[in-house]
Image (tube, rainbow, N blue to C red):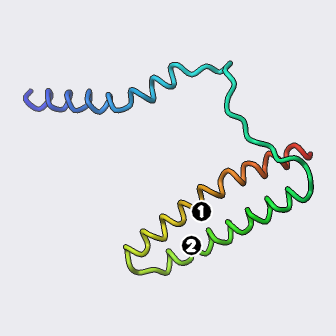
Amino acid sequence: MKLIFPIAAALMLAGCSTVSTVRDAWDWDPTASQQRIRVVSSSPAQLAALNDRVAQLQIQRNDLRTRISAEPDILTRQRLYADLHRVGQQLSPLERELLAAAAVRR
């Protein structure tokens, strides 16, 4: 019996940590306009430049992954993971933009 109360209190406190996400889900309005992906105009020069930048970042990402797998030092790997995260943050919106432009061109 003494164990039940601390466990119940811990569960209630753990549930409080998700209140903000529950509130966001509860208040979500599907009729409200959502943030749209910026679509690149269909000029071939802009699409080529975007495609080149995506390819450059993908090569950089693959190079970082190779360096991470070969690195024995944990501190150096952590710095490489930070670089990988930075490259991924740059790459992700560009890939979405390129996919949106490809969908518009079809």
Residue for point 85% across, 49% down? 102
Considering the image in quadrants, where does the C terminus appear? Answer: top right
Q: Nearer the viewer, mark 2 or mark 1?
A: 1
Q: Are marks 2 and 1 in contact (CB under 8 Å)?
A: yes
Residue 31 in percent (x, y) is at: 68, 18
| Numbered disc 2: secondary structure | helix
Q: Position of residue 71 (x, y in %)?
A: 45, 80
Image quadrant assignment for residue 44: bottom right
Q: The disc labelled 2 sits on which kind of residue? A: Leu
The vertical placement of 57 against 30, above or below, is: below
Q: Amino acid at mark 1?
A: Val
| Residue that numbered label 1 is attached to | 87
Q: Residue at x 90, y 49 (%)?
A: 42
Element assignment for label 1: helix
Residue matched to label 2: 64
Mark 2 and mark 1: Cα distance apart in space: 9 Å
- From the viewer's perspective, tell me whether residue 49 is left or right of residue 96: right
Disc 2 residue crowd, few under 14, some 14–19, many 20+, Cα 10 Å:
some
Residue placed at 86% from the left, 61% from the top? 48
Closer to us: 12 or 54: 54
> Does 31 appear above or below 64?
above
Q: Earlier in the sequence, mark 2 or mark 1?
A: 2
In front of the other: 63 or 14: 63
Number of marks in picture: 2
The N terminus - image quarter: top left
* Residue 77, image x, y percentages: 44, 73
